Amino acid sequence: MAELVIRNARITNEANSFSADIEVNQGIITAICALGTAGAGEVEIDANGLDVLPGCIDMHVHFNDPGFIHREDFASGTRAAAAGGITMVVDMPLAGKPTVINTEAVLAKKNAVASKAYVDYCIWGGLVDNNIGEMAAMAKEGIAGFKAFMADAGPDFPFVQNDVLLAGMLKAKQLGSLIALHCEDDKLVKYLEEQEQSRGNTDVPAFLRSRPPYTETIAVNTAVTLAAAAGARVHICHASLAASVAIVEAARDKAPAITIETCPHYLVLDTEDFKAIGPVAKCSPPIRSREEVEALWGKVFDGSLDVIGSDHSPSTCDEKEAGKGNIWQAWGGINGVQTMIPLLLEEGVRKRGLPLKRLVQLVSANPAKILGIYPRKGTIQVGSDADFTLIDREGDWEITKESLYYKNRHSPYFGKKGKGKVVATIVRGRLVYHDEKIIGNPGFGRYIEVKN
């Protein structure tokens, strides 16, 4: 008898869709068989009328644990992930104490979160201006790679100048590891911010003027140039512009190992929304115009974009409210791990006709391939981890304060409604979310080592 049987599954992988029954034992898919032919299961799920996707992977979250758990911790963050159909998260190295920039911090992070996770996880290490010598030992701990900033990220996480960035890429190449980059030009952003602030401008348009599109594209151009020179694997985080994707696309003949990600807020919200919503929608890079939103959707459709991640960046409600009279005072970051999949199902699949297999590429298969954990994760195959996201494409949802599992329940999407509901989230054969309830246990989520 199988431990879990999913019957009447309408499966969509990154390349095809088909109907089958699924058998699971010891957390692994052990059989994919014709409808009606699976044996009995200790637990059985009838997926009739539902789509069964490979478990969704969010490569870009900030759960602030340990150190700033008044904003979020691994328990609340991974509960929200489970409720959003996410079976694995990769946590960023900053916005915590200590920042993950050496081996001791990697171990401290692992120890702090191991008893809290509801879904599987990995962590990013950091590349800062003085830790090249730490990278080899950190990589041995199975981290996802090294995140670096090309613009100011605060005193606890020094951003990198081009010389350190190139050195970090060369070291990552030697280690077989991955560099993830926040691409904004620091000197330009600082100059433009100073110009706005010196004039006493404190509203949303002032913030937008301080980070125009070229502050992003200049940094992306630099990143791909250095990636080509180093021959390194580089992942561009949270691109807000189709032009950034086009730069990467054009560079792939010289830098074939470069990938690029965007986020739901760049595909859903525009500058007019930002002005109406206020500081809750503040992030960096900022929300762009409606024309840029639709151009970015074009890159989602044409295959040149690789990944969609939430960039879940929590804060207290007070840290957002501080920007109501002065946008410079607001926390820059958007809660998004729970709402990513429903928003993409509504805005992409239902409204724009995005093929479901393309969504699977963006949120399951490609993240797993970039991390080097495919086909263990990111696909539905015999031998793969039994991670599944079950969705009802006709299921209605509405984003309300009460529906969120975040520690601080603010969102720029309050009141938004749509179709495409997460019905169940299964991690290694175990239901962790079902019918609007968290049913998993903290500590069940497992650290997934990346072996380069």
Image: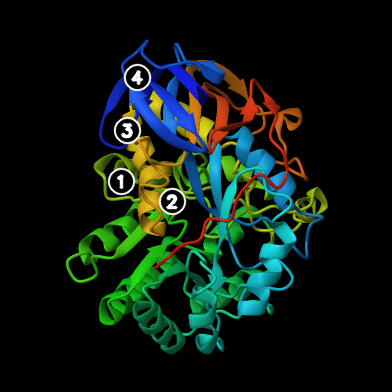
Foreground mark, 1 or 4, reads 4
- List the residue tagged with mark 4: 20
Say what amino acid the circle numbered 3 marks: Lys
Q: Quadrant of the C terminus?
A: bottom left
Question: In the visual, does 65 lie left or right of 418?
Answer: right
In depth, the one of 362 and 373 nearer the eye is 373
Distance between the Cα atoms at labels 2 and 4? 32 Å
Which comes before the other along the chain, label 2 or label 4? Answer: 4
Which comes before the other along the chain, label 1 or label 3? Answer: 1
Farthest residue, direction left? 253
- List the residue tagged with mark 3: 357
In depth, the one of 242 and 233 nearer the eye is 233
State the image coordinates of residue 43 (x, y, percent, origin top left): 58, 20
Say what amino acid the circle numbered 2 marks: Thr
Say what amino acid the circle numbered 1 marks: Lys
Q: Mark 4–mark 3 contact, CB under 8 Å?
A: no
Q: Which mark is residue 262?
A: 2
Q: Is residue 233 visible?
A: yes
Say what amino acid the circle numbered 4 marks: Ala
What element does badge 3 sit on?
Answer: helix
Distance between the Cα atoms at labels 3 and 2? 18 Å
Foreground mark, 3 or 2, reads 3
Q: Residue at x 69, y 56 (%)?
A: 114
Farthest residue, direction front? 1
Which comes before the other along the chain, label 4 or label 3? Answer: 4
State the image coordinates of residue 286 (x, y, percent, origin top left): 53, 56
In depth, the one of 282 and 72 nearer the eye is 72
**From what the image shows, is residue 106 above or below residue 20?**
below
Q: Residue at x 73, y 44 (%)?
A: 442
- List the residue tagged with mark 1: 299
Distance between the Cα atoms at labels 1 and 3? 15 Å
What element does badge 1 sit on?
Answer: helix
